[in-house]
Amino acid sequence: MAKGIMYIDGQRVPFDGEPNVLSVIRKAGIELPTFCYYSDLSVYGACRMCVVEDERGKIETSCSMKPRDGLSIRTNTARLLQHRRMILELLLASHNCSCTTCEKSGDCRLQELSMRFGVRRVRFRDSREESTLDDSSPAVVRDPSKCILCGDCVRMCEETIGMGIIDFARRGYNMRVSPAFGRKLSETHCISCGQCAAVCPTGAITVYNQIGKAWRAIHDPQKRVVVQIAPAVRVAVGEAFGLPAGQNVLDQLVTALKFMGVDEVYDTTFGADFTTIEESQEFLARLEKGGPFPMFTSCCPAWIKYLENENPKYLKNISTCKSPMEMFASIIRKHYQEKDAEDGRTTFHIAIMPCTAKKMEAARPQFYHNGKPDVDVVLTTLEIINMIKESGIQLPQMELESPDLPFGLGSGAAVIYGSSGGVAEAVVRYCLPDKSKNTLRELQYSALRGNESIREATVQVGEREIKLAVVHGLINAQKLLKEIDEGTAYYDLVEVMTCPNGCVGGAGQPYGLKQKKQDRAAGLYAADRAAPFKRAEKNPVVRDFLKNYTDEERHELLHVSYTD
Amino acid sequence: MARVEEIIDSYGCERHHLIAIMQDVQAEFKYLSPQVLELIAQKLDIGVAKVYSVATFYENFSLEAKGKYIIKVCDGTACHVRKSQPIYNAIREYLELEEKQKTSADGLFTLETVACLGACGLAPVVTVNDQVHSKMSPELAIELLDDLRKEEAAHDRD
Amino acid sequence: MTATKLTREQLKVRQMKAKRALEAQHRQVLICAGTGCIAGGSLNIYDRLKEACEKLGVQVQVSLLHEDGEVESPSKGKELHLKKSGCHGFCEMGPLLQIEPDGILYTHVQVEDCEEIIEKTLVKGEVIQRLLYQLDGVTYAKHEDIPFYHKQHRIVLENCGTTDAEDIDEYLAKDGYSAFEKALFEMTDEAICKEISDSGLRGRGGGGFPAGRKWESVRTQPKGKKYVVCNGDEGDPGAFMDRSIMEGNPHSIIEGMLIAGVAAGSDEGYIYVRAEYPLAVSRLKTAIAKAEELGLLGDHILGTDFSFHLHVNRGAGAFVCGEGSALTASIEGKRGMPRVKPPRTVEKGLWARPTVLNNVETFSNVPLIIRNGAQWYRSIGTEKSPGTKAFALTGNVVNTGLIEVPMGTTLREVIFDIGGGIKDGKKFKAVQIGGPSGGCLTEEHLDMPMDFDSLKKVGAMIGSGGLVVMDEDTCMVEVARFFMNFTQNESCGKCVPCREGTRRMLEILTRIVNNEGSLEDLDLLETLACTISETALCGLGQSACKPVQSTLKYFRNEYLAHVVDKHCPHCNGRKKELQIDPELCKGCGKCMKQCPMDAISGQIRMPHVIDTEKCIKCGACWGCCPFGAIREE
């Protein structure tokens, strides 16, 4: 890794291992503008906004420049500013500038930079080709008229997710980002992970917005609105209100939701404890029966969709457990059945998730009962942020209020579901015969936690040494499957999360790079440490419920098959 | 489709032969249908969006069925200077092509322009199914197409 | 019967046999089989000649040696050698037929002429006057006397037009592959790079980067897989030098690449050829197959440990693939989009491996340098730009075609001595050099030596070597628009300045050409050109504005004619009919005064009318109407 001193606008700036000059400039406190630079993806170098000038007056992009000892560059010369303004003007000329009504307004990089660089006039004629909005996906909406062709979504879909659903089509001025043959997303194998929307700097790909539906339910006196909040949401929602990533604001969020008119607020960790128990028991049963191995976790709906679309032979390896959200939803459905009959209201279930694929999951026929989905609306963290802001609620100023009982209580093992490795760790905590504090503490330092995209660990369960793998970023799961296919790898249990860093990096979360996602995960591990009980089976309410369910009920409520 | 598979197999299903495979397929079938591209994607184990992306990048690939005769009017510098545009216009008119239409209603002719064919000494040139016709004029071009049409009509009567 | 793979000694024997066989040939008839002449029907002429000869009892031979490397038949000294040669370069005059050793060049030969040629020239030794080249009343019987060839210095193109491109033995007979043999057995990799560096050979594809330095960079990369790639994606409109070499002398490219392989430590090469050059592809494939047969390509070449495999890739229609990283992406089966550098191609080129990437003409020079030495090469051309350069001379010039001249030759020599001056006695105005990435040169540059650095200084570049000559009737704004249209169409779309910027420049230029532009448009054009040239990702984008910038510099008055006068003397004015909108016309009479043709009539304060019979569509009225009442119909 290169080390040395660079001169940025005449100031000495040391560098140490930064991948490019852009990172050094940003480290020095200058927010050089970019559209196509997303540090978690490959360098594309197309937007040309990050250009800098060297001593000889040569202009180059800093994203593709390697730091060199003694290198001297300028970041804000008259020429550079003129070029940036021109590039912005060119982009705006081909952009659908209906900003005020845009989903992304206020959060759009093109808008922000145009403002920053004072582009007040576009001297070119609007000669855009007409384009059609694609709202066929349950997770995202594509509006090609707002696309600036930075290619972030294309690289995300290909490099991190490994799906390659959207790509560039045609070339030159006619270039577009599009699925094959200009098809709608619903006609492709898109898994609804929404990461394309998460990296889109403009409103070209946005999360499918269901705020209206949620408000209507909240405002309908006939509806009993019941909310569950996923673990990853509580450590990200504060970011929109000036709080640092990772700060747990669950209790403020509960109050805010109550202010907004929600009847009951519950915690998805309650559902996750069911999942841990069911999944662990299934795993132990498989150990007894001898397979099929590896057993794959089933919490991530995008992962399941991927197997269905691309690799169905592994569907049998998926755990039969529903995801925590859907387990919770069936429990609530059952729980409120009688009550609904009693008071004549209908229960309306809103799940607040860090995830866009959950919108797709909620719409699956497996999770429909009596013509009604178990989860009526899935709102992403971003949508709930919008609703809070719409209500004028200052989240940080909210009183603290715990989620309602009986479904407001979860174990520490359930909170960490939101981070990559959390599900596997929860299962291990259940399966380990030695439940001492020290054993738990040791797990912390195992490969179950960390940022590596593929991590392996072994634990001893009885006689048997269990091989585990934890994968995040779907492309890594694809690599792993290939190794399993080829027989070069063997695992007993594999946790897969489609999004980088797991649910904390979900596409429904506020925009963030790797560091932010890691901070959120750290927030969840802190919540685990503070939790009164660490293991799923210690959850008294869960234990009670399980005791009361018949085997049949248990199967119907908590398990699902994707193969029929 | 069996033939397409044969072509793909002849390249050992290797990804980097994607362009060559599409060229060979198009040489035989004149265009690349969605089914063909899907098959190629599947056999080479690449996303179909990627295949579509590559196919639409290069000018030579056609995703639409083309006429029996593909007429290319060279619009390279030399041909342009020697008035290739009027030839193109005359052919358009003769074939009664509407705005974005490239293939005549009878499916016989597809009209395209092509960047320099390198036969600048013979400018302006027109190719019909890759056969070069040199020193063309609007009149000569129409005559050429007329002959082809008559030939086709005679064929049909036989 | 398959020929056995040659050893070094066997190669030398075969070269000698071929040389002797060639010397023994009594008479050769070379029919040009370049794309141009084939389009003119030269292959039919070949067939007819062969047929007619057989009918007349003249013995015909078509190849130099037998497949096993033996002499075809005991030479009786009487038979006729009929050959399909590469491009003579004089495409304007095609189909061409050359008779050796007499050196007679027949032009515009038709199938009907074949019998006459045999009976008169071949049998009786008479020259057919009407088939000879004529200029200014002078008839030229001999090839070398023709002014078009006289001033040229053909080293790279030497074999084009004089040898049968499909016969490897003809190449061997002319010392072919001896440079490779020398490099392989007598030189170290370092010495080869040094020789190329010493020769001063600079890349012929555009920028003129020293080839030796490039090779040395690849050579010194850590060991492992390396590639040699030949850029035959000659996409400049109006340029066809590389095509002629690929068609006419394919073995020189193969030999050049082999030498690069030895020098850089590579065992695999690719030649990327434009899709529009099917003949070049087939000639190269034939040549590669032949070379493989003889063991000049493949494993253990000439019995050594050196192996080299060569593939031909066809382009699929994208000008941008002439850019190095786009080209390698295309070979990899991807979209031909350039990538940001670093890393450079010499470090991470094809499949992210170190890669020597040169163009056709560059590789073609290599065997000559190795064979004759760096000093010999330096004796040609200028000090900073040694060697020759092939140009494609087109446009409004008397002799169009392919030429090769020493670097540093002046434009005047090229256009007036070789090209025979401007067509139809018109005046010279400008020449566009280097295609859409180059700039234009004017009268004041006629005596400037053409080499890499002199051209760069005046905002032009050699590029791949297209020379489009324009006469006094050419509208330079229209020329700029034409090239901008080209680059705009060929922009890959990756970076914003090129994708959006060229499009906007084209819009503005079109507006100006149509006399609808404003002075603000000129400023915008210049600002845009500045941003695009300084911030575009690749060379194509960075140089996309050169034609606009240089025409703005040298022919600003023509832009002003379009913008201010709304009338360009070169453009035949406006193409559409002008009419006065009676609703808007206030009858001020300004237009009536401006009209040079007295085509406008009308009473004061009453709507005026344009007599379309008299109107020359100059647009003078359009420019002066304060009410915008004059419309195009």
Image: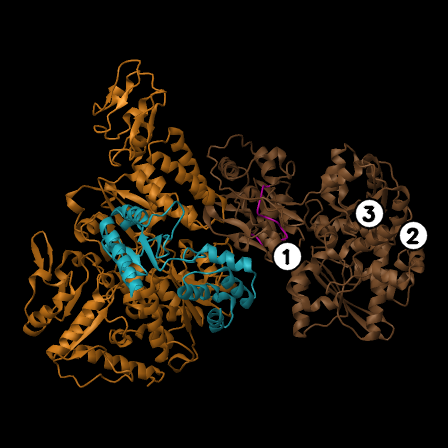
Chain colours: A brown, B cyan, C orange
Closer to the camera in the image, C3 or C281: C281
Any part of residue A318 in sight: yes
In contact (CB < 8 Å): disc 1 and disc 3 = no
Residue identified by numbered label 1: A160
What is the chain identity of the residue bearing mark 1? A
Closer to the camera in the image, B10 or A452: B10
Residue identified by numbered label 2: A532
In the depicted structure, whether residue A373 falls above or below residue A455: above
Callout 2 secondary element: loop
In contact (CB < 8 Å): disc 3 and disc 2 = no
Q: What segment carries the magenta color?
A: A32-44
In the depicted structure, whether residue A100 falls above or below residue A404: above
The amino acid on which the numbered mark 1 sits, given as a three-letter code, is Thr
Any part of residue C543 in sight: no
Which quarter of the picture shows residue B116?
Answer: bottom left
In percent of width and height, residue A380 lies at: 73, 45
Question: Is residue B82 on the magenta stretch?
Answer: no
**Viewed as shown, does residue A363 lie left or right of A555?**
left
Q: Residues within 10 Å of mark 3 (few under 14, many from 20)?
A: many
Instruction: For marks 2 and 1, give the CA distance.
Output: 36 Å
Q: Earlier in the sequence, mark 2 or mark 1?
A: 1
* Tag shown at residue A228: 3
In percent of width and height, residue C47 lies at: 20, 72
Q: Earlier in the sequence, mark 3 or mark 2?
A: 3
What is the chain identity of the residue bearing mark 2? A
**Viewed as shown, does residue B154 lie left or right of B38?**
left
